[in-house]
Amino acid sequence: MTTFLFWNINKKPLIKEITNLCRIYNVDLLILAESNISDVEILLSINSDEQRVYLALFNTLSTRIKFYFRYPPECVEPVTDEGYISIRRLSPPIGNDILIAGIHLSSKLRMTEDDQKFQATRMAEVIREAEVRVGHERTIVIGDLNMNPFEVGVVAADGFHAVMDQNIARKRSRTVQGKERLFFYNPMWGKMGDTTPEPPGTYFYPSSGYVNYFWNTFDQVLLRPDLLDFFSPKNLKIISDIDGKSLLTSNNKISTAYSDHLPIVIQLDNERIDNVSQ
């Protein structure tokens, strides 16, 4: 198993919480957004009792996304850094390589819905260019999209084209106006609302407008079809508790004592990825 953890920490000094998360979930790849904590501080803390040490590789290439890998440096290669997206190629000792796209898109406070849609279109182009460059589509996107799974930028064919149904995603693509459009699968559809033991979303915003979702699922994981055989829904979680300390208030809203976003964690069964054709 490879364990990925993402958290937009809202520029908070959450070193202890991050360290505990890495320990509790045995994290192999930590991805942070809105982090002002230096790599040195992070590494000193998360490596304090680890036999396999974390490395901060190529973080100078991006100001919005930081990666911490628990892999030897020869296993990680930078592929793309373009403002709001950073893509790394992970070649683990066991199994085929995968692409990890860490993403932190613009806030709705700074962009209109149309702006976000066009930004998503560009991000999808960057991901596709990276896939063509490395010669495969074993791609995971993880991060803060600042859009919900049902919004146009996430579902549109020229955006992320992320669908809620694995059966559809496994068709790999569909043709729209004569052009093939690859699918992503978005398991975060199953995390929205209060029918699971987890929080109804990853971000809470009580606006005074006519339309207000209150809970939003901005922090997401998207998987290309080539990774679906190595994913189980039980291995995706919205985290609301760290070592017995709740990240929520007494009335079940996100506590601003921590971040305004909740962390997400996902495991992929990478020990089986070596059975995938190159």
Image (cartoon, helix red, strand yellow):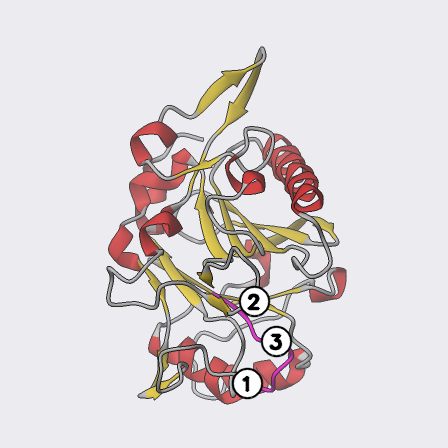
- Percent across and percent down for residue 231 are 31, 47
Residue identified by numbered label 2: 208
At x 46% / y 31%, what residue is drawn?
Answer: 183
Answer few, some or many: residues within 10 Å of disc 3's Cα (few below 14, many 20 plus, some between 14 and 19). some
Residues at marks 2 and 1, CA–CA distance in whole angstroms: 30 Å
Q: Amino acid at mark 3?
A: Asn
Answer few, some or many: residues within 10 Å of disc 1's Cα (few below 14, many 20 plus, some between 14 and 19). some
Residues at marks 2 and 3, CA–CA distance in whole angstroms: 23 Å
Depth check, front residue: 9 or 100? 9
Return the mark for residue 10: 3
Secondary structure of residue under mark 1: loop
Please report contact status of discs 3 and 1: CB closer than 8 Å, yes or no: no
Give the left or right position of residue 3, taking residue 139 as reference.
left
Residue identified by numbered label 1: 14
Is residue 245 shown above or below 51?
A: below
> What stretch of residues is rendered in magenta?
6-13
Q: Earlier in the sequence, mark 2 or mark 3?
A: 3
Secondary structure of residue under mark 3: loop
Depth check, front residue: 173 or 90? 173
Please report contact status of discs 2 and 3: CB closer than 8 Å, yes or no: no
Q: Amino acid at mark 1?
A: Leu
